[in-house]
């Protein structure tokens, strides 16, 4: 882990629609002073509102992570938070014109390709835990465990109860190139969830260019035609492996690696880089951000 704090060398801009709201937005990732952390700013409002990227500001984890201050929110922050973490960025201001961060290609790849890193010459303050933090969901068996360690690392196992995906594992530490191994992994959805999600206004910006679609159960030509119409495509087919034919997997465990991408972004809401070994089983935005909040509470308690 880099010993000194870093920010972005120059402002970079992105624009596009949000996955869940379908609304168009623009963002600008800007340099920020040492010790200022990651802050989102809604600049499209009459009076701009600053929303620090901290776990206590999480207000929704329905299919993505939302942070808010008062009535003002920024939706789907996990991919950009993961990218900043993978690049070793301590401090940045993210100006947002709109409600939701653009989904882009469904991964963190566009961010890591565009962002240049600048050293700030100020020692990095790693988050040092005095004890283990573990969050468990007894009903599902899911857990996130964060334990003190000499270095920053992640390992997860995901079980989607899927014959297509099976059980997948993924890991990240300082020996792994985040840009080529994690950032490029795209979000995913099961075919049978798509209609429900559209009807519940959860993937208004989704299409088959920014998501892997897993076909777990047999589907009819009529169903394929209906989904093709929903996402604005003339025709969609199912591959022999059980995916829609819109794209080629970048890794056999790309879906598991994307869950790792999300976990890295969500845990960053602890407020920095934990000096910890993080292991998880069946992680999701809810349990991830609960674990980040528990870390913040522990650190606050131990500092008194």
Image: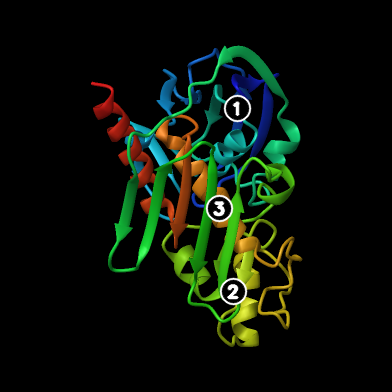
Image spot of residue 194 (x, y percent)? 52, 69
Mark sitting earlier along the chain (2/1): 1
Label 1: how many residues lie within 10 Å, few (<14), some (14-19) or many (20+)?
many
Question: Residue 89 shows which numbered tag?
Answer: 1
Q: Quadrant of the C terminus?
A: top left
- Helix, strand, or loop for circle 2? loop
Please give left or right for residue 74 compared with residue 121 in the image: left
Label 2: how many residues lie within 10 Å, few (<14), some (14-19) or many (20+)?
many
Q: Nearer the viewer, residue 271 or 3?
A: 3
Residue matched to label 2: 165
Residue matched to label 3: 260
Q: CA distance from mark 3 to mark 2?
A: 15 Å
Q: Specify the quadrant of the image occupied by residue 256.
A: bottom right
CB contact under 8 Å: marks 3 and 2 = no
- Is residue 72 something one can see in this rendering? no
Label 3: how many residues lie within 10 Å, few (<14), some (14-19) or many (20+)?
many
Please, is residue 165 above or below residue 117 in the view? below
Image spot of residue 303 (x, y percent)? 28, 22
Question: Residue 276 shows which numbered tag?
Answer: none
Q: Specify the quadrant of the image occupied by residue 121.
A: top right
- Helix, strand, or loop for circle 3? helix
Image spot of residue 271 (x, y percent)? 43, 30
Q: Nearer the viewer, residue 41 or 37?
A: 37
Residue drawn at (27%, 27%), measured in percent from left and top? Answer: 302
Query: In the rendered view, how is the structure colored?
Result: rainbow
Count the marks: 3
- Helix, strand, or loop for circle 1? loop
Residue drawn at (46%, 53%), measured in percent from left and top? Answer: 279
Image spot of residue 107 (x, y percent)? 64, 49
Residue drawn at (46%, 64%), measured in percent from left and top? Answer: 197
CB contact under 8 Å: marks 3 and 1 = no
């Amino acid at each position: 882990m880099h010993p000194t704090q870093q920010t972005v060398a120059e402002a970079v801009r992105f624009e596009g629609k949000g996955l869940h709201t379908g609304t168009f937005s623009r963002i600008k990732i800007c340099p920020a002073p040492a010790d200022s952390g990651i802050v989102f700013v809604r600049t499209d409002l009459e009076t701009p509102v600053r929303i620090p990227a901290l776990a206590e500001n999480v207000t929704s984890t329905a299919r993505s992570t939302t942070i808010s201050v008062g009535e003002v929110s920024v939706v789907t922050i996990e991919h950009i938070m993961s990218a900043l973490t993978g690049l070793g960025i301590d401090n940045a201001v993210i100006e947002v014109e709109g409600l939701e961060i653009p989904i882009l290609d469904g991964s963190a790849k566009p961010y890591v390709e565009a962002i240049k890193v600048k050293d700030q010459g100020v020692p990095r303050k790693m988050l040092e835990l005095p004890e283990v933090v573990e969050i468990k969901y007894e009903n599902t068996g899911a857990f996130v465990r964060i334990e003190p360690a000499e270095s920053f690392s992640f390992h997860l196992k995901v079980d989607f109860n899927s014959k297509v995906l099976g059980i997948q594992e993924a890991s990240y530490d300082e020996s792994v190139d985040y840009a080529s191994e994690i950032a490029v992994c795209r979000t995913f959805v099961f075919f049978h969830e798509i209609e429900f999600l559209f009807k519940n206004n959860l993937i208004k910006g989704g299409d088959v260019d920014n998501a892997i679609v897993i076909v777990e159960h047999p589907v009819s030509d009529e169903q394929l035609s209906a989904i093709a119409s929903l996402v604005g495509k003339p025709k969609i087919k199912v591959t022999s492996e059980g995916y829609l034919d819109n794209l080629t997997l970048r890794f056999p465990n790309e879906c598991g690696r994307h869950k790792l991408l999300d976990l890295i972004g969500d845990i960053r809401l602890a407020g920095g880089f934990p000096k910890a070994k993080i292991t998880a089983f069946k992680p999701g935005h809810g349990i991830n951000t609960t674990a980040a909040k528990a870390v913040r509470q522990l650190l606050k308690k131990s500092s008194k």
